[in-house]
Image (cartoon, grey):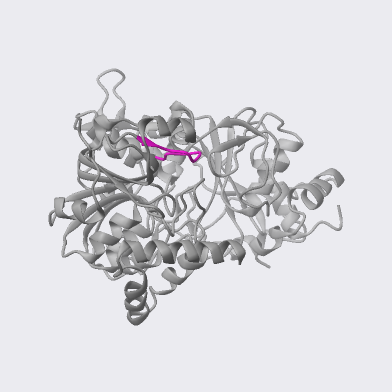
Amino acid sequence: MSDATLAEICVVACAESWRGDGEVLASPIGVIPTLGSRLAALTFEPDLVYTDGDAFQLGAPLPSDAPADASKVVEAWMPFGKMFDVVWSGKRHVMMGATQIDQFGNQNIACIGPWSKPKAQLLGVRGAPGNTVNHPTSFWVGQHSTRVFVPAVDCVSGVGYDRAAAAGVAATQFHAVRHVVTNLAVLDFETPDHSMRIRSLHPGVTVDAVQDATGFPLVVPADVPETRAPTDEDLRLVREVLDPNGLRDAEVGG
Amino acid sequence: MADKRLTEEDVVAELRDGMTIGIGGWGSRRKPMSVVRAILRSSLKDLTVVSYGGPDVGMLCAAGKVRKAVYGFVSLDTIPLEPHFRNARQNGTIEAMELDEGMLQLGLRAAAWRVSFLPCRAGLGSAIMEINPDIKTVTSPYDGQELVAMPALPLDVALLHANRADERGNAQYLGPDWYFDDLFAMAAERTFVSCEEVVDPDGFARNGSAETIRISRLWTDGVIEAPFGAHFTHCVPDYGRDEALQREYAATAKDEDAWNAFRAKWIDVPEADYRRFAESSLRSERSG
């Protein structure tokens, strides 16, 4: 729809990452991925499973700014101990952030500079090593730039295709880096050598603009489609049900 | 019949320089802060701290108590990066063993089961295998796959905070998640559990069903009655996180004087005084 904002286009692009997943746990990190996973569940992936980010699996989504004590429809109990069971059993598709990401999908959220004495200690590797070799992983980057899309990341937290292959069958068996959604485009790794390619461009964005904001060469198909536009129903759900107070806008770079 | 009740100071007297101490809870949630404060006031040093870390790890780093931190993360939840821990890492003042979150619980489980490792997929291909050269892989005798052999993480002592406990050391968890407190207890030589209230054995039933009594006295060696013992981290349903005080704490990472002032006000004080401050701070947090 013509009046969709960039944030809303990104929400729909994130939602599309879970298309075809069926009954798995959608674990989004960040506002836009969270809205995307809920939108997918309310529209084309009704069997997706999601939680309140704490210990409960929900039967209906909460709005983005729901207070901690908001009443919830709880359909299952999912404390952190169970969460690792879900991760390691593979019934999950996570969408994480990335401070840095490279051509083969290696992601860094741990630190900038050498790990032994970092210039900036960030989140640490958190669950990224286990996530990426156990079940599908996608990424959300709100500000697509050469600072994020780098030739080599400082500390491999999430494992990319080249490093998984080097680590052997146990690492590749369930490994899949699906989509990287940014404020400019959707990227994927559906190329013969799993190097990053442009999957779709957001409205008004050119291939050159995406390549210029990326620190390594991207694979560009002959025909690059435009990212799917939000439907009227998508916009109603995002604006009225999932994010009535517009938290989505703060997470998208201009 | 053993009465395991003791005080924070009694626990500290059982600790030694260089010990490996596991701390329960998760991030800024249900941390045994009253015992951590007692450690901060002590002369203990060179500790190895194993934790899903929050302000426990941050404060121990800020006070120079930590030789090595073993962690899946160190975060204040609503403040994603623990600022005192960041300082320690960026200044190179601590050794670190950084693990995937799932690997940490596996290491505790291996210690609990008294085996030297447990296999997993997590870690393969990631920096984990480079930044932790002591972590090896193992080839499965069944299908030939190379897996990570997550080493056991045995603890000298585990420190936990529960909602309720009895004097024999059974512990009750009333919130939605007891995190990995049970694994910490089983991985440790000795476990000390602080709690909001010590109850009679029949008192458990007044608070919650039998399934909420998550830790058996088989695994505990001491019980500390510590009302507001997890403050400023949250201890639901007894109280939520004191976000205002957490923000004040986080801001002290920027300058030494602010940290010393925070110490004087919130750490170097008798626990009885602390409890009054905590109660009043939580009340203004709720009304603010």
Residue B121 to residue A150: above or below: above
Residue B60: give x, y in percent of width and height. 28, 62
Could you say which is closer to the camera, residue A184 or residue B12?
Answer: B12
A252 or B28, which is in the foreground?
Answer: B28
Q: Is residue A36 left or right of residue A190?
A: right
Residue at 38% in and 51% down: B31
Q: Nearer the viewer, residue A71 or B77?
A: A71
**Quadrant of the rendered image containing residue B36:** bottom left
Tell me if A28 is positioned left or right of B227 in this view: right
Residue A240 higher or lower than B189, as above or below: below
- Residue B158 in picture, x, y percent from top left: 25, 44
Rendering quarter of residue B216: top left
Compare residues A119 and B153 and report the one nearer the observer: B153
Percent position of residue B26, x then y: 41, 48
Position of the C terminus of chain A by quadrant: bottom right
Number of marks in picture: 0
Q: Is residue B151 visible?
A: no
Q: Is residue B285 magenta?
A: no
The magenta span reads B171-179
Q: Main secondary structure of the magenta part?
A: loop
Q: Residue A212 placed where, x, y %?
A: 60, 65
